[in-house]
Amino acid sequence: MSGRLGISTIVYSKAFVSGTWSKRADMLDYEKKGFFQFLYVTACGYAESVICDYLHQILFFPLHEMQTKKLFPKRPITVNGQPAAVDTEPEQRAIQRLLERTVDEIGKAPFERLESLHQTIVGLTIRDFIGAGLHDDLKGLVSVRNVLAHGRTLYVDLDESFRADVRFEQHPLGNAIKSLRQRGIFSSDHVSTLEPNEVMAFNLPG
């Protein structure tokens, strides 16, 4: 039987974060923002790795038993009134291949697919399993990770008076804003209006 040797990439990310955390006070403003972007991506990766490891552990022993098993029981049947037996190995190997394919998929599935796999394997949605509040926080973290990890633009829509549109409808960070609102961290009452010269001055360093 073949095997697999690996290490979670979270190990390296955790080492970098741990080593850099104590130096954050010496960073320039944009360096701090870059570091915390990496921190968000790492936190989301860690959360997803916990889900993946949990699903892998559920499937590990039944799959291992099938992979190492050499003999499978015969199923007794009756054919034309006479006792007979059917070899169950073909159907058992079919289940083994399904499990192997599912395990491989878990390792490369995006969060939305992990949610579907979790419901199939565990019998509960992640939301039911960890609670609505924590699930909303997790989806908010995933939305932040998606923007940062894929190099998307961080933006807010402005109206004619340069006032921010705080509805965040159809916004990439919509789930994150929803979670922040629920926690009382973000409030529409705290949004200020930008002056035209402030909007024009918004650019990258250097």
Image (cartoon, rainbow, N blue to C red):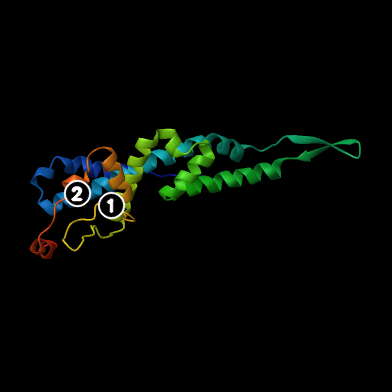
Name the residue that disc number 1 marks: 167
For the residue pair 150 and 18, the one nearer the viewer reads as 150
Q: Secondary structure at mark 2?
A: helix
Packing grade of label 2 (10 A; few <14, some 14-19, many >=20) is some
Q: Residues within 10 Å of mark 1 (few under 14, many from 20)?
A: few
Secondary structure beneath dot 1 equals loop
Residue drawn where x is 53% and y is 39% of the image: 121
- Write down the quadrant of residue 89 in the picture: top right
Q: Residue at x 26, y 37 (%)?
A: 183
Q: CA gap, disc 1 to disc 2?
A: 28 Å
Q: Is residue 149 above or below residue 181?
A: below
User: Are the two marked residues, 1 and 2, in contact with CB atoms closer than 8 angstroms?
Assistant: no
Name above or below for residue 86 compared with residue 159: above
Residue that sits furthest to the right in the current view: 81
Q: Quadrant of the N terminus?
A: top right
Asked where in the image residue 151 lies, by quadrant, the reply is: bottom left
Kindly identify the amino acid type of the residue bearing the numbered disc 2. Answer: Phe
Give the percent coordinates (x, y) of residue 170: 34, 56
The three-letter code of the residue at mark 1 reads Arg
Q: Which residue is mark 2?
A: 35
Q: Which mark is residue 98?
A: none
Q: Note whether residue 4 is visible.
A: no
Q: Nearer the viewer, mark 1 or mark 2?
A: 1
Residue 113 or residue 103, whichever sits in front: 113
Q: Is 98 left, or right, of 39 in this rendering? A: right
User: What residue is drawn where x is 78% and y is 40%?
Assistant: 86
**Which of the two discs, 1 and 2, labels the residue nearer the N terminus?**
2
Question: Residue 152: x and y, percent?
Answer: 28, 60
Q: Quadrant of the C terminus?
A: bottom left
The reply to whether residue 191 is in sight is yes
